[in-house]
Image (spheres, rainbow, N blue to C red):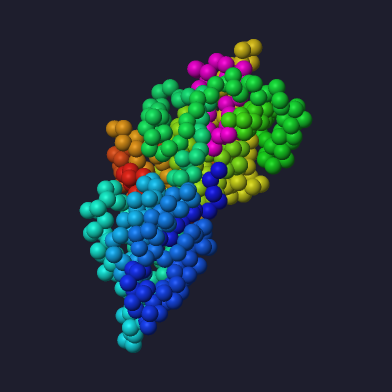
Amino acid sequence: MASKKPKIGLFITVDEIYSTAFDLMDIDNVVKGDIQTLIDGLSGENEVFFEKIARNESDGEEIGKHFSSLDLDLIIISEFVYTLDEPILGFLKNIRKDIPIVVFMVQGYEGIPEDLTVKDFSRSWGINGTIQMTASIPNMLDDFKYRFLVGNPGESGIISRINSIARASWAINSLKKAKLAYLPGVFLGMHDNWDNNTELEKRFGVKINWLTFSDLVKQFADIDENEVKKEVYDIKKKYKVIEPEDADLFDEARMYLGVKRLIRDRNLSGLTITVDPGHCSEFMDFRVLGYYTISKLMNDKFACSDEGDMSLVIAQYLLGKLSGGHIQQWENWAFDKKENLIMGGHSGIGATALAADPDRVFVRNLMYDKYTLPNGEVRKGFAFNFVLKPGRVTMLTLGAMHNEYKFKIIRGTAVDYKLLDIHTPIAVIRLDNISVEEYFEKICRFGCGKHYALTYGDFSRSCINMAETLDIDYLLI
C-alpha cells in the first residue's frame, strides 16, 4: 500500500572536528535550529525522517541502513557544516540505489550580512564541503546521480521545488506497487496504443495482467438486481437522459458493477478496456460498449482508459497522484488558429465531476457506433455529453517512438464554451505558450500517441521531475 504522503529522508552532516574542537562557537545548536527550519518547511506536504547529525563514517552507515528500511521516496543530502567524505560514503554505500537524491547546498542565513559573526559564519561552512563531495563521490562510487539545489533552510522556493520532486518520486514509487490490466487487449489498427509491456514493467516496475471477458462474466452472478436498479436510478437522478432506453442503462450499470468487483478481486490500480465490436464476439452478449463504466471509474479517481492504451493508464495514474484530482481522457479533435484554441475529448467517456455545469450533463446515444446483438436487435449505446469546466490544465501522455518511452507535457487553459451536439464530453483549450501550427508539428514529430491524461492545475514541473527521475525524454509545451 502506497503512503498518502511522500517520504523524505534527511541526511545532514557536520564533521566531527567541528562538533568537538570548536565548542565556543556552539555550532551544533546553530545547526539544529536550521535543520528544524528545514523539517518544518517540508513537513506540510511530506513525511520527513531525520535520525541525527552524521559526523563520521559509522554514523553514515547506521543512517543509510535505517533509511533503506523506510521505503523512502526521496533523500536529501546536505552538509550544514564542512564534512569529510567518509560519513557520506558510509551512507551512500548502505542506501537503496533506486531512491532519488537531492544534494542541497545550504546556507543558514540569507545573503552576505554586513555584521556576519564567527558563529553565524559557521552556518555557511557546508558550501565548500558540498563542492568537495560532488567531486569526490563520483570518483569513489559509480552511479551517483542527484539533483542539485542551492538555498536557505526555510526558503519558500526551495521548499516548493523539493515538494515537487518528492511528489513526482512518490508517484513513481506508488506505481511500482500497482497492478494494471487489459480487458481484454488492444484495439486493432491503433498501433500507437500497442505497448511493449516488458519494457513498461521493467522501466516503471508496474505489474501488468491480461483479463478476459469471461473473468467479467463470472462477476455478474454476485450482482444483486437491486444494485443495478439503484445504479440506473442514480443515472436518471444525476443526468438528463435523452435517447438511450432503459435497457441500455441497465446493461451499462451491470457492466460497471461487474468491473468494479473485478477490480476489487484482482486488487487493480488501473485498467484499459477495449471495446471493438468487430473482434470481441463474447463481449457483444453484454450489449454495452463500456463508456459508462470508464466514466464512472474516472469519477472514482481510478486510472482507466479505453482502446487498450496501457501507456495512458500509466499517465493517468501518475498525473492523478500528482494532482489528487480527477483525470479526463482527451484527444485532439478540432482547432481554431485565430483564437489559438484546440478542442478535444473522448467518445462518450468523461469524468462528470469535471463538468462545468453539473445540471447540463446529458446521456446520449453514441455518435456513430451501433452494433447488432446475437438476436438481431440493433443498439446505439450510451455516451455522456457535457463541457468541462474552465481553468488551468496539465495534459500528460506517455508512449514510445522507435521503442523509446517518453512524456509529452502540455500546459494550457480550458475556456468556457457552449455545449455542442456531438454526444461526447468536450474541453476547449487555449494554448498559452505556442501557436496551433507549432503545437501540432511538435507533438507529431515527438510522438507518444494521440491520447492524453488531463487534470486541472499546473503540474508541469512535477511531470518534468518524473521524466528526470525516470531518465526519459520529454516534450514541454
What is the x, y in percent for residue 317?
49, 42
What is the x, y in percent for residue 446?
31, 40
Task: Name the residue: 51% across, 63% down.
Answer: 43
Q: Nearer the viewer, residue 327 or 462?
A: 462
Dividing the picture into quadrants, the one containing residue 132 is bottom left
Q: Nearer the viewer, residue 181 or 120?
A: 120
Q: Is residue 270 magenta?
A: yes
Look at the picture and state if 123 lies above or below 232.
below
Q: Residue furthest top?
A: 375
From this viewpoint, is residue 345 visible? no
Task: Name the residue: 64% across, 21% down.
Answer: 218
What is the x, y in percent for residue 301?
57, 43
Query: In the rendered structure, which segment of residues is drawn in magenta?
Result: 267-294
What is the x, y in percent for residue 174?
49, 44
Relative to 141, 52 lies left or right: right
Task: Name the residue: 34% across, 35% down.
Answer: 400
Dividing the picture into quadrants, the one containing residue 35 is bottom left
Q: Residue furthest bottom?
A: 115
Task: Name the residue: 48% across, 37% down.
Answer: 313
Q: Is residue 203 magenta?
A: no
Q: Nearer the viewer, residue 331 or 306?
A: 306
